[in-house]
């Protein structure tokens, strides 16, 4: 089973991306120096590029992803509330007959 640990703080990620852009070191070496996986560092760099507006068409920024996540949760709650109201209306309609 793979080792897991808490996510790295955003400040650490931002500093790692800044180092990757300015240090001139290769990503594998920088990842080793920082104690993170190459895959994680590459993901942070890609996410920073997307957030800066340099991603592929259709890729969502971090803010857009958070908004989408929030809206999906909201839709789920509203669907549950609608279902409860539908069942309540059907129950009370049977009571009045």
Image (cartoon, grey):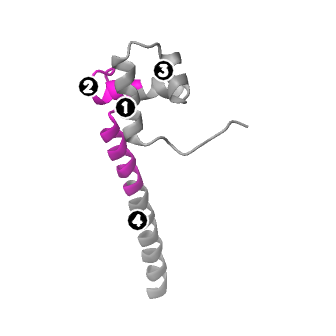
Residue 60 place in picture, x, y as percent: 34, 32
Q: Spatial distance from mark 3 to mark 4, Cα to Cα?
A: 52 Å
Residue 58 place in picture, x, y as percent: 33, 26
Q: Which residues are magenta?
A: 45-74
Q: Spatial distance from mark 2 to mark 4, Cα to Cα?
A: 38 Å
Foreground disc of the pair 2, 4: 2
Q: Residue at x 41, y 54 (%)?
A: 73
Label number found at residue 30: 3
Q: Quadrant of the N terminus?
A: top right
Q: Residues within 10 Å of mark 4 (few under 14, many from 20)?
A: few
Foreground disc of the pair 2, 3: 3
Sequence-wise first label, 2 or 1: 1
Q: Residues within 10 Å of mark 2 (few under 14, many from 20)?
A: few
Residue 84 place in picture, x, y as percent: 46, 70
Q: Spatial distance from mark 1 to mark 4, Cα to Cα?
A: 46 Å
Q: Which residue is mark 1?
A: 15
């Amino acid at each position: 089973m793979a080792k897991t640990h808490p996510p790295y703080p955003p400040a650490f990620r931002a500093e790692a991306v800044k180092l990757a852009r300015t240090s001139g070191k290769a990503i594998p070496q920088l990842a080793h120096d920082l104690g993170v996986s190459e895959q994680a560092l590459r993901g942070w760099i890609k996410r920073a590029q997307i957030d800066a507006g340099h991603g592929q068409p259709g890729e969502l920024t971090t803010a857009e992803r958070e908004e989408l996540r929030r809206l999906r949760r909201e839709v789920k709650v509203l669907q549950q509330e609608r279902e409860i109201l539908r069942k309540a209306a059907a129950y009370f309609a049977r009571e009045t007959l």
